[in-house]
Image: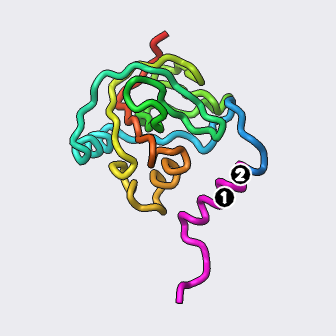
Amino acid sequence: MRARGWSAGGLMIALLAMTACAGSLDSSEGGFGLGELSAEDSAEVFASAGVAPEPMNGQLRVQDNGCFTWSGEQADGAWIVWPESASLDGENGGQVMLDGGERVGDGSPLRGAGAVVALEDLPGGSNPDSYFASFGGYCGADAAGVVVFTEVASSR
């Protein structure tokens, strides 16, 4: 007989759904923050996925649900995992502060170095109760993939 109760992943999904129902997110809200990896963790992800960072050019898209996704030739619609030097803009959650203080938001042109990986390649990405699997799954990374940046800047 199956035990009754919520798993951590199920609870996370329920909380996300309730948050979304409490009020719709517009493109100026950042949702649940930024997925970030240190340089060391990114290197491990690339090694396990069998890829290497390459130049990437495209645009940032901020989805209605607060997810930050990539628009470009490589992996259009993929969820973005940022270098740990990036942060969510505290004044405007729909923008990202890049290394050096530059802010980018929906439609901003980006250039950088990164690689496209599967959600399962991220730390804990195959564990539905992990941060990356829960957050990435919510942002559609299980279907669209993930762009992991090692460096990123605005190309304005």
Inspect the image, locate mark 1, and give the three-letter code of the amino acid beneath it: Leu
SS at mark 1 in the image: helix
Inspect the image, locate mark 2, and give the three-letter code of the amino acid beneath it: Thr
Compared with 123, 147 (above or below) is above
Quadrant assignment, res 126: bottom left
- The answer to whether the residue labelled 1 contacts the one labelled 2, judged by CB atoms less than 8 Å apart, is yes
Compared with 131, 106 (above or below) is above
Farthest-out residue, bottom: 1
- Coloring basis for residues: rainbow
Where residue 66 appears, as percent x and y from the top left, is 62, 38
Quadrant assignment, res 41: top left
Quadrant assignment, res 65: top right
The answer for how far apart the CA atoms under marks 1 and 2 are is 6 Å
Q: Residue at x 67, y 30 (%)?
A: 27
Residue 136 shown left or right of residue 55 in the figure: right
Where residue 61 appears, as percent x and y from the top left, is 55, 28
Compared with 140, 149 (above or below) is above
Q: Residue at x 38, y 32 (%)?
A: 149
**Mark 2 lies on residue:** 19
**Mark 1 lies on residue:** 15
Residue 155 shown left or right of residue 9 in the figure: left
Residue 37 shown left or right of residue 43 in the figure: right
Q: Residues within 10 Å of mark 1 (few under 14, many from 20)?
A: few
Where residue 94 appears, as percent x and y from the top left, is 63, 30
Which residue is nearer to you in this view: 66 or 34?
Answer: 66
Q: Residue at x 54, y 44 (%)?
A: 139
SS at mark 2 in the image: helix
Q: Residue at x 36, y 22 (%)?
A: 56
- Magenta residues span 1-20
Residue 54 drawn in magenta: no
